[in-house]
Amino acid sequence: MKSSKQFSLRKNNSFNVKSICPIVYFPQTLSDLESLPDLSLSPFYILGEGSNTLFVDTQAPIIIKPDFKGIDITETTDNYFVRVGAGENWHEVVCLCINNGVYGLENLALIPGSVGASPVQNIGAYGVELSDFCVEVTWFDFSSKTLTILSNQDCCFSYRDSIFKNDLLNKGVITEVVLKLPKKWQANLSYSGLNELPLDTSARDVMNKVISLRQAKLPDPDKLPNAGSFFKNPIVSVDKLTSLKNIYPSIPFYSQDDGTVKLAAGWLIEQAGLKGYCKNHVGVHQHQALVLVNHESDYGKDILALAQFVQKQTYKKFEILLSPEVRMVTSHGERKFTDLPIVDWGK
Ligand code: EPU
């Protein structure tokens, strides 16, 4: 199996911070996975394209970077089935589908990252989530060294969450994802911005609109390093919303099926006065406050310090604790944001 020692991850994290791992493995086949060393006692982290990971330290743990390739489209009378290797790029799959007349993924265009990462955080945008299409995930179990097929239900998908972040965390690797796309297609134009499109719009037009909306709001990581939304949109009770509405009548919110309410973290951060905030070469993006950007720091610690500051300031104002969507990886492996020591970044 391809591997590399003392590997610089700088080009493998969209925050573009410095971090070196002792070894990185690039499994491409089942036998590569079977030959991985026993990592049960060593800190390690499974990395996709690094677009949702913050390497907090300049030393990273052992990295496994799945490199399973292949895209295969089959069809039945009513559906297309798209089987994709975990190492493929998500946006390229979306484009390939649209170019082949397979529609449904257009709202998820331009989301950075690999296919293998897409079920882990149940990627979502513009009213659509991966869980709407994902029917099967093939997963290699480190302890039994066998492949298991997980159904949509088995994956326990919810907002930016799945079994892979919980019960199956660090217990195996996703090798393939199967998506089911009904041939009877209907545009999903529910999200604001897309509702300007005519009802008889094409999937390609929806994709182009999603791309232009994303490009207008979200900085290109190649030009201004970032990891998309840094925090999840918080879910609160209706009572909490009611008390906030008394003070902020125009607060954006999205009612959930279970009676709770999702708030817009970007709005909360902006109201806390932090949009465009900048310190120690890192900052809060000036067009979308949910995105933390790296202007020119070499260190993940600077982004962490900023994120801790944003969390503290928004809590002070709203008594809502924002929780990161981005995964925190230290030299000892992945850690919960709240378990990381507060970084002192000066006055
Ligand atoms: N808003 C502000 N100020 C800001 C940012 C947003 O007031 O600085 C307000 C907007 O005006 C709007 C609301 O907040 O009323 C929601 O904003 P937006 O539509 O930009 O979406 P979001 O909730 O901030 C989520 C996802 C994005 C996804 C968009 C579009 C999360 C954590 N983020 O962002 O996903 O692209 O919706 O569907 O759920 C990502 O996960 O990396 C990501 C970019």
Image (cartoon, helix red, strand yellow):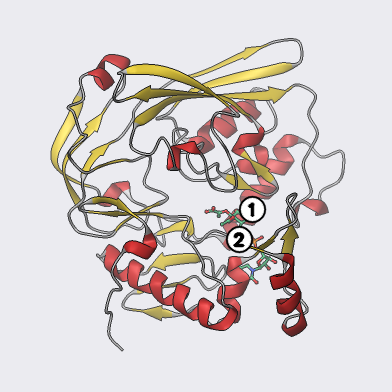
Q: Secondary structure at mark 1?
A: helix
- The residue that mark 2 highlights is 216
The foreground one among 140 and 208 is 140
Q: Amino acid at mark 2?
A: Ala
Q: Is residue 91 above or below residue 275?
A: above
Q: Residue 337 at what x, y percent from top left?
A: 38, 61
The foreground one among 199 and 77 is 77
Q: Residue 165 at what x, y percent from top left?
A: 44, 42
Can I make out residue 264 in this image? yes
44 relative position to 241: left or right: left
Can I make out residue 275 in this image? no
Q: Residues within 10 Å of mark 1 (few under 14, many from 20)?
A: few
3 relative position to 155: left or right: left
Q: Are marks 2 and 1 in contact (CB under 8 Å)?
A: yes
35 relative position to 54: left or right: left
Q: Residues within 10 Å of mark 2 (few under 14, many from 20)?
A: few
The foreground one among 141 and 297 is 141
- Split into 4 quadrants, where in the image is the C terminus? bottom left
- The residue that mark 1 highlights is 212
- Residue at point 58% right, 39% down? 157
- Residue at point 24% right, 40% down? 63
Q: Quadrant of ligand 1?
A: bottom right
Q: Secondary structure at mark 2?
A: helix
Q: Which image quarter: residue 148?
A: top left
Is the C-beta of the residue carrying label 1 under 8 Å from the nearest atom of ligand 1?
A: no
| Tally of numbered discs | 2
Residue reaching furthest bottom? 347
Q: Residue 342 at what x, y percent from top left?
A: 30, 73
Q: Amino acid at mark 1?
A: Ser
Q: Is residue 267 above or below residue 24?
A: below
* Residue 55, disc: none
Q: Which image quarter: residue 58?
A: bottom left
